[in-house]
Image (cartoon, rainbow, N blue to C red):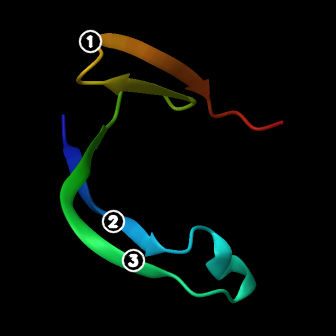
Amino acid sequence: MEHIVIKSLDRINLLGEHVDYNDGLVLPAAIDKCIYMTLKTNGTENRCTVKSKGLYQKLVILDLNFH
């Protein structure tokens, strides 16, 4: 099964938090942490299963049929 791996680098805000939405000043800095996400098909067209490698359990099954 083909899969995609995504890596997202993390950051902290040294100054300001969520004030940039209103044209406020922030001072973000990169840190040495990141989050990985792996995506692969699960044989269904309308469900998404979300798991955590650290929790060893199925977290949630999402129904992708929007009504």
Tell how many labels: 3
Q: Which mark is residue 28?
A: 3
Q: Which mark is residue 47?
A: none
Corner quadrant of residue 62: top right
**Dot 1 or dot 3, earlier in sequence:** 3
CA–CA distance between discs 1 and 3?
33 Å
Residue type at mark 2? Answer: Arg
CA–CA distance between discs 2 and 3?
7 Å
Disc 1 designates what residue? Answer: 56
> Residue lying furthest front in this view?
15
Marks 2 and 3 in Cβ contact (< 8 Å): yes
Above or below 45: residue 57: above
Disc 2 designates what residue? Answer: 11
Q: Provide the secondary structure element on which disc 2 rests.
A: strand
Above or below 65: residue 29: below
Query: Badge 2 local density, few (<14 within 10 Å), some, or many (20+)?
Result: few
Foreground disc of the pair 1, 2 = 2
Task: Report x, y in % for residue 53.
Answer: 23, 24
Corner quadrant of residue 59: top left
Q: Provide the secondary structure element on which disc 1 rests.
A: loop
Residue type at mark 3? Answer: Pro
Q: Provide the secondary structure element on which disc 3 rests.
A: strand
Foreground disc of the pair 1, 3 = 3
Quadrant of image for the N terminus: top left
**Dot 1 or dot 2, earlier in sequence:** 2
Quadrant of image for the C terminus: top right
**Dot 2 or dot 3, earlier in sequence:** 2
